[in-house]
Amino acid sequence: MTKVMLWALRQLYFYTMNNEQLINKYNVAGPRYTSYPTVPAWNLEDFNLPDWQIDIKKTFQKDQNIGIYIHLPYCESLCTFCACHKHITINHSVEGPYIEALLKEWQLYLSLFDQKPVLKELHLGGGTPSFFSPENLKYLIENLLSEVTVPEDAAYGFEGHPMNTTREHLEVLHALGFNRVSFGVQDYDAKVQQAINRHQPFEKVKKITEIAREIGYTSISHDLVYGLPFQTIDGIKNTVEKTLSLKPDRLSFYSYAHVPWIKGNGQRGFSEENLPGGPEKRALYELGKKLFEKAGYEEVGMDHFAKPSDELFIAREEGRLHRNFMGYTTENAQTLIGLGVSAIGNSATTYFQNDKVLKTYLEKLQNGKWPVVKGHLLTEKEVLAREIIEDIMCNFHTKRLDVFADDNPEIYGELRAMEQDGILTFNQSDLWVKEPGKAFVRNIAMLFDEHLKKDSQKPLFSKTI
């Protein structure tokens, strides 16, 4: 047995025997905080399209920089771990009509702007963006870029499925300015892949990673997930070591979000008994973290790792790391436009989301109507809480504690309880997350979420650990 395996077993024992009480205490349902307030807490009654459009215009007039997230929902098969909005089909004739709808939606946004936008960040997510042909993606992006200014430091990326991303996909998008690609790996263990219906051999991931590097992508990411059914210490070790052999520039090591009450039977391809429990699940992460750091990667925010040469790490060091609906980002465009079915965007003090029903989304745009169906106008108190939560999620530190405590003095008592558990330290104005507290960063952020204190009759979020 190798030294790493011996360490892993000791780590598992340590978490099970010594941290079990702490993990069980904090392993409660809670948000991931890609936004605040979270979508379930949005005040839908006070949201309306005219006020929303006014807010977008005001935000854009102050700063012409924008970000765009394009949701491409189609997948050829269902991955049973997935909690994203998707549409399963093998009929690729859907590509054209969907792209035309996206471009019509884009024109609606352009009608709000009095200047040419500067597109700082562009991300293609899904679903499976590489479901679309290179030709159709080229048509979409070329039309979109013809209406914007592209700065030299633009960050354009897409999510690629290793089984259907081709050299042509990579070449076409790179020629259009894409410099980042993330490949969804999840796990290499055959039993885990069978359970989550995600079959992809290491050799396939290796080949497409090498092609991306050859073409010139400067940030190649691999996405892994821990807490999946049937995962073991030995299996995670094997997956991580194979991933490290390909030397990606950054890594995502996501906690599996088990939310079958939201996504239906798609997440019931296995039994809850097949999932690792809280202490065992955290031990999987600790092993991965140990191996990543040994290979020269640095932990960035929650569930992310990057080489010191990668822009994500550099942004953290320079205080430019941000968190939004796309996850961690190096850019902070105040106007984030979500294009596509179910897509979410935001302006300075407004969140908004498109219709989640694909047929309705397409019909609205065919008739020239906005597909936005709900949103939220932030209060001043919510803006402050959002800033503090982002500080904690990005930097594990905030300097705004005293401002928040002016109206919420009880926060100090709640923080003292966490300080006694050894997960944070604080004074009148500053809060620091301690190294053991990084496992509970979502729980710390929850202290500043006034909406969680309202009673809910149904589950909304996955467990925090």
Image: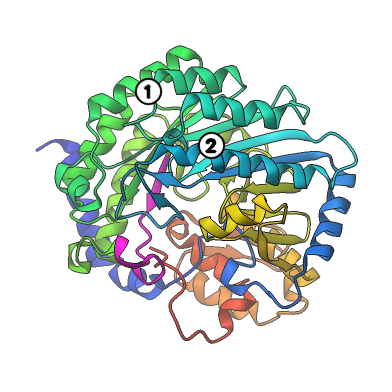
| Secondary structure of residue under mark 2 | helix
Q: Residue sitting at 71 percent across and 42 percent down?
A: 106
Q: Which mark is residue 209?
A: 1
- Closer to the eye: label 1 or 2: 2
407 to the left or right of 448: right
The spot of residue 276 in percent (x, y) is 23, 61
The spot of residue 13 in percent (x, y) is 20, 58
Question: Magenta residues?
Answer: 252-266
- Mark 1, Cα crowd under 10 Å, few <14 / some 14-19 / many 20+, is many
The spot of residue 386 in percent (x, y) is 68, 62
54 to the left or right of 181: right
Q: Which mark is residue 12?
A: none
> Badge 2 is on which residue?
96
Residue 253 counted in the magenta span: yes
Which image quarter: residue 140? top right
Identity of the residue furthest to the left in this view: 1
Which image quarter: residue 440? bottom left
Q: Nearer the viewer, residue 48 or 303?
A: 48
Instruction: Specify the quadrant that holds the C terminus.
Output: bottom left
Residue type, label 2: Gly
> Relative to residue 126, is residue 262 depicted above or below?
below
